Each structure stands twice: as C-alpha cells, then as structure tokens.
Image (cartoon, rainbow, N blue to C red):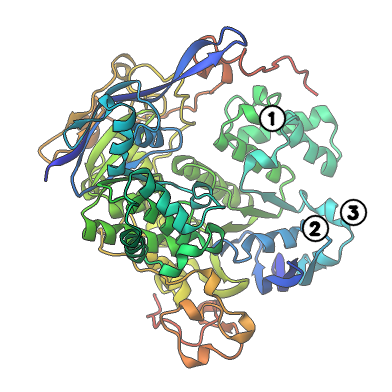
C-alpha cells in the first residue's frame, strides 16, 4: 500500500472579529491545531471525537472547503494547497464528500438526475448523453437504488435512500477519496447497518479510500482500518481499530471508550467507567500544555507546562500524545479526582472577547 | 399495585385530512421505584406516548383514548387545572433538547424555584435556597452563581442537569425522560446517565426512559418495551430481552449495531427496507414486509400481544427460537 493522503501539521484557525467599523480580529478559534496523519490507499481512516473537537473542520480543510491556515496536504503526490483556481476545481473530482444530513445537503427542487448530472457537467464529463445515462444508471445501481429514481425528488425517498443518493452524488465522478462526515448519525438504527454495509461494499468493488468522521465509536471501529482520536483540535491517539480498543493509551481514549453504552446488561452492570469531569474547554482559549489536562484524572504538573507531541509508542505503530502513557499503562501512576472546572463565558473566550461580544449582566438582582 | 398503569392508550392524529394512528393500543405498567424503557425508532410513537401520559398533546386535532391510571386516578379524565397540579409535583419530565425546554430570558434559579413556589407554596427566598441545593445535588459546580445565570451561559450537559433539577424539585414519584442524552456527547451522556441512575436508586423515583439507543436502556432499565409502528411488539426484563430477544425486530436491531466489546466482524446484519414499507396493523404484522422470518400467518389479521416467559410479552407468530437464559 502507498499513502494517498498525507497531512502535515495542518492548522485551521478561525478569526474572531469584533467592532462595527474597524472589524479587528481579537482572537482565534483554534479549530484544528497541528494535525499530522497519513491515509493509505484503499483503507478507511476513522476520525472520532466529541462535538467541537475539530474533526469536521479537519475533513473540510483537507478538501479545502475551508482554507487551512497552515500546514501541508499531499494527495497522491500533489501538493493540494499549492493548486489555484481552475486547477483546484478540477482536482476536486478526485476527492468527494458525503454529508451528514441528506435532507439539507440535497437541493429539494432538483431531481436526482439533475443532482447527479450537475457534478458531471462541472467536470466536463457529460458530453456524451448516452454514456452519461449509462453512468448514472450504474452509479444508482451500485448504491442500491432503481433507475426509476432518476426522475424523482429527494422528498420522495426515505432517510436511508436519501443518504444513498448523497453517496451516489459523490460516487458518480469516480473519486479516489471520499470524506464522509457523520454518514449514518442522522439515520435510524435499522437503516444505519444498510449504509455502513454499502460503504464497505463500494470500497471493496471500487477500491475507494475513505476518511470517515463520526462520533459513534462503535460504528467507526467497525468500518475503519486506522482510527484517530481528536480532542480540542489535535490528534491525541492513533492506532489500528482493534489495537485502540484493546489497549487504549491516552486517558481521553480510555474515558471515551468506557462511556459508550453497550447493548448488553451483563457488560453494563460490570464495566468500569471513567467519568470525565466538566465539559470541553473552549477552542478559542485552550488550556496550556496538554489540551486534556483540565479533565484528565492522571494530570501532573508537567502536563500544564509542556504540550505532548504525538509520538510512536511501540512497534505496533500506535501513536499517542501523552507524557505519561507508559506509567498509566503500567499502573504506576494512579488517577486522582478531578473537580469540574467552572467554565465561564468571560474566562474561556480569547483575551478581549467575552464580555464585549456577549453582553452578560452579572448584576441581575436575585429575584 | 402499580404506580402507573397505562391501558390500551391510543392517539390518533389528523394528517392530510386522514386519521393517522401514532400510538395504537399501548399498555404497560410502572411499579414504584422501577425503571421502564420505551425503545423504538423515530416514528414508532414513543414520544407521543409520553406526551399523552402527561396530557401535553394539543387538545385540538387529535384523539386520545384508553386509560392512564396514576394512583387509580385516570389522568386522561382530569380537568386541565387538576392535571397542572400533578405535573411537576407527582410526575416530572425531562426533554431531549434542554435549550428549547428552558426559558432563555429567565435566570436559571428562578426557573427551578418556580416549581417549588407553584407546588409547595414556598416563598421566593426559601425556594431559591432550595433551588441552590438542587443544582448542587445534580452536580452543577458553583450553584450560587448559576442561580443568576441564563440558559445560554451553560454548556449542554449543564443545561440537561438543570432540567433534571427542575424535574426532581418536588420529589416526584415518576420521572419521564424523553431521549435525555441524545443531544449530548458520549462522555457527557455517561455523566447524565450515572446521575439519573443514582437519583432513581437513591430516592425510589420510578423512571420511564424513552430512547432509540439500546445501549442506554441496557444499563438502566428493569423492564424494556420495544415499540414498532405504534404498538408494543416485545416486553421483557432487560437481561432476558438482550440475552434472548424473541421478536425478529428486536433481534434484528441488536444484530445490526456494531459493538465495541466484541471482535470486529464482517458485514453487519441489516434489516431490509424502511418504515415506509410497513403494512397497517389491521392487515397483519406491520413489520412483516421487512421481516426475515415472515410466514403466511403474519399477513391477514392483527397479531395479538401474548404473554411470554417471566412476565414478558410478545407480538409475533414466528418468533426467533431462543434458549431462555438462566
């Protein structure tokens, strides 16, 4: 296998603007803050994390749907960030996206045919009418929809079928990479399995490479070869799926895995949970040092001073960003209690934001 | 004697000038201190059931029939005024989206205190002191300051905690939680579920847990009702239901979710079709068109809900053969 995508130190920072006339930048939201990863050709890379950890922004940054602030993206040997205008537009044929909510990502006033043809036309692939129709039919067939679907509109389909249309739209251009952002989370449980299986079948028959972004760890583990866990803009751990579940190294991964409910009462009654205190800190003002230290039951003074790098842990290739991964694994470092920190709108925003942006009255008398 | 006895509850809406049965003769009971789960996919009628129990459905345009006996009083027959006295005092409710359930322009403390003033006739200052204790009990840090804050200043998990504090303010005997963790992240979900479990076990409050997530009920509920297209299709104690699901729908659902604790398999088991393929219950089993075990007897007339082992119930003519777990 050779790598299809290489991301090196990718950063996406969103400016926080303030002021009516001058519109000055008063701070940044560090949505993605230094992520490096490699996606092999033909594999599925799963990205998990809680809402607000930057996983969707990373996917969008990779396709340059949002412009990265810094870093290098190499796609099959091409430096994607160096491409300009028309070059970039044409390059997009090779990397497509499947969105979370098929109802809001499909134009309700376009028929399925027009939805699919739009991309083909944009890339000049719609010249031969007959060939195009064959292509549409075979694409629909591969996602398990009848050819009669071409003349229908999105509202005539069920949720699962709509997601199939979303996949067909990405597929019709014959891409090499598909970025799927929460492809099943809007679907009912009984439909999720259909779409998960479809993604697997398509990968097998077409040799596709996936970047699957999801918050559901069980689904991600099922379809991914490699899993990356994100927390507050950076990758904290990366490993092969079974390895990650069998031996999670980062305290956050351990907490995340222990929090996923398992549909088996015997397991539920016995399992140990690592309950995290508090909430995700604001990405506009992340904690110093290790981003996770404010909620970490194992945090030490070193964690506040020094930001841990994502380092290769051992021969298995598992990567982890924690100073004390060895000690925690060996059990020599004992967890301590973490008190939930009070997250205040004034304190967690970037310097100079907060009170001015969000007018907050603290002098409201006790009623 | 059960605390809540729902008998043959039906809710019929008018949709496009045609009657649509959202809940179709649902019966179940909740014993004092028991945690009961209502599980099903979107559109199976689980939320409408809870709204009907609370009398929160709009009076116009829909018909609610059956009996909802709480302490031998039929809640469906109460006048609105009498019902208002009971809601919040005897029965508390937690909704899915805490931001839209809290009033955005009223400080949090007042929203908690309001319940105490209304039902226990407490004076404002006393109610606020009590509210502070309640916020503390549900694990909100620095409750004194939070009393004066507004919902938008709280995180999602904190808002859900506040909502639980409001629901539990009058120590109700029954708490209805409608998808309380669906809008939350897994780590926050674990916090809220642990909190609910402690509160229910500590105070002896009965709980009706409504969710689509089988994992959530597995750790929490004593009895689980599985709903499909407005009817209960299977009811069992949680160990029986997860250990030996009898209804093909329950069985299929459990098979179709990938599990973290088992080896990674190949393809997932899938239930074919979607809820759009259902047939009306009057013409047989609504699930028949999607069922792997469909036989001739499934089509024709309504399949009755029959008693099954250990107090459970099953609505199926050709159930999945299972060994009864010890």
Q: Are marks 3 and 1 on the same chain?
A: yes
Q: Is residue B215 visible?
A: no
The numbered dot on residue B81 is 3
Instruction: Tell me the distance, in whole angstroms, between the alpha carbons under discs 2 and 1.
Output: 34 Å
Rendering coords of residue A227 (x, y %)? 27, 43
Q: Secondary structure at mark 1?
A: helix
Q: Which residue is mark 1?
A: B132
Rendering coords of residue B222 (x, y %)? 53, 63
* Dot in front, 2 or 1: 2
- Subunit that carries the residue with mark 3: B
- Subunit that carries the residue with mark 2: B
Say which residue appears at 69% left-offset and 26% top-offset: B147
Q: Quadrant of residue B80?
A: bottom right
Instruction: Tell me the distance, in whole angstroms, between the alpha carbons under discs 3 and 2.
Output: 15 Å
- In the image, residue B94 sits, relative to residue B67, either above or below, namely above
Between discs 3 and 2, the one toward the N terminus: 2
Q: Quadrant of the N terminus of chain B?
A: bottom right
Task: Choose between B85 and B157: the one closer to the eye.
Answer: B157
Instruction: Tell me the distance, in whole angstroms, between the alpha carbons under discs 3 and 1.
Output: 29 Å
Mark 3 burial class by Cα count in 10 Å: few <14, some 14-19, many 20+: few
Q: Quadrant of residue A324?
A: top left
The numbered dot on residue B58 is 2
Q: Are marks 3 and 2 on the same chain?
A: yes
């Amino acid at each position: 296998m050779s790598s299809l995508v290489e991301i090196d130190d990718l950063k996406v920072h969103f400016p926080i603007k303030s002021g009516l006339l001058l519109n000055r930048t008063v701070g940044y939201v560090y949505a993605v803050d230094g992520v490096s990863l490699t996606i092999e050709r033909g594999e599925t890379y799963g990205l998990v994390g809680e809402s607000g950890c930057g996983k969707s922004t990373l996917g969008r940054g990779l396709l340059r749907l949002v412009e990265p602030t810094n870093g290098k993206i190499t796609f099959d040997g091409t430096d994607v960030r160096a491409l300009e205008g028309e070059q970039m537009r044409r390059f997009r044929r090779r990397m497509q996206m499947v969105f979370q909510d098929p109802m809001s990502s499909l134009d309700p006033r376009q028929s399925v045919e027009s939805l699919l043809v739009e991309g083909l036309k944009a890339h000049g692939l719609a010249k031969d009418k007959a060939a195009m129709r064959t292509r549409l039919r075979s694409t629909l067939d591969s996602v398990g929809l009848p050819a009669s679907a071409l003349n229908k509109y999105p509202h005539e389909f069920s949720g699962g079928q709509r997601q199939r249309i979303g996949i067909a739209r990405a597929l019709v251009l014959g891409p090499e990479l598909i970025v799927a952002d929460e492809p099943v989370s809007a679907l009912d449980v009984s439909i999720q399995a259909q779409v998960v299986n479809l993604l697997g079948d398509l990968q097998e028959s077409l040799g596709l490479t996936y970047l699957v972004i999801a918050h559901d760890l069980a689904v991600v583990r099922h379809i991914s070869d490699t899993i990356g866990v994100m927390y507050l803009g950076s990758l904290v751990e990366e490993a092969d799926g079974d390895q990650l579940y069998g031996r999670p190294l980062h305290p956050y991964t351990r907490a995340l895995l222990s929090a996923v409910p398992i549909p088996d009462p015997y397991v539920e009654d016995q399992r140990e949970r690592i309950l995290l205190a508090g909430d995700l800190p604001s990405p506009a003002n992340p904690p110093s040092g290790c981003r996770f230290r404010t909620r970490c039951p194992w945090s030490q003074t070193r964690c506040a001073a020094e930001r841990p790098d994502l380092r290769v842990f051992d021969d298995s290739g598992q990567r982890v960003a924690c100073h004390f991964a060895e000690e925690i694994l060996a059990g020599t470092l004992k967890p301590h209690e973490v008190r939930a920190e009070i997250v205040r709108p004034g304190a967690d925003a970037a310097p100079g934001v907060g009170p001015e942006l969000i007018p907050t009255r603290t002098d409201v008398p006790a009623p | 004697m059960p605390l809540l006895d729902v008998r043959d509850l039906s809710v019929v809406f008018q949709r496009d000038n045609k009657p649509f049965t959202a809940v179709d003769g649902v019966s179940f009971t909740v014993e004092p201190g028991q945690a009961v789960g209502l599980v099903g996919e979107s559109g199976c009628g689980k939320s409408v059931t809870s709204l009907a129990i609370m009398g929160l459905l709009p009076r116009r345009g829909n018909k609610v029939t059956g009996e909802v006996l709480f302490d031998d009083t039929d809640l469906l027959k109460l006048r609105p005024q009498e019902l208002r006295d009971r809601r919040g005092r005897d029965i508390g409710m937690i909704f899915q989206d805490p931001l839209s359930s809290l009033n955005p322009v009223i400080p949090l403390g007042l929203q908690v205190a309001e319940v105490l003033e209304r039902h226990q006739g407490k004076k404002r200052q006393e109610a606020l002191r009590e509210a502070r204790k309640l916020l503390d009990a549900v694990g909100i840090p620095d409750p004194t300051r939070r009393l004066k804050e507004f919902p938008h200043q709280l995180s999602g998990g904190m808002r859900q905690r506040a909502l639980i504090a409001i629901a539990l303010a009058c120590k109700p005997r029954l708490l209805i939680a409608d998808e309380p963790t669906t809008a939350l992240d897994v780590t926050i979900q674990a916090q809220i579920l642990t909190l609910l479990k402690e509160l229910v076990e500590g105070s002896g409050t009965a709980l009706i847990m409504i969710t689509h997530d089988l994992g959530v009920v597995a750790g929490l509920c004593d009895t689980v009702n599985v709903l499909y297209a407005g009817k209960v299709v299977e009811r069992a104690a949680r160990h029986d239901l997860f250990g030996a699901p009898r209804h093909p729908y329950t069985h299929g659902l459990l098979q179709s979710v990938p599990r973290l604790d088992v080896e990674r398999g190949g393809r997932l088991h899938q239930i074919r079709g979607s809820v759009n393929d259902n047939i009306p219950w009057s013409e047989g089993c609504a699930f028949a068109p999607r069922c792997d075990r469909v036989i001739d007897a499934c089509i024709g007339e309504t399949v009755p809900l029959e008693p099954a082992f250990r107090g459970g119930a099953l609505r199926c003519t050709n159930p999945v053969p299972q060994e009864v777990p010890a």
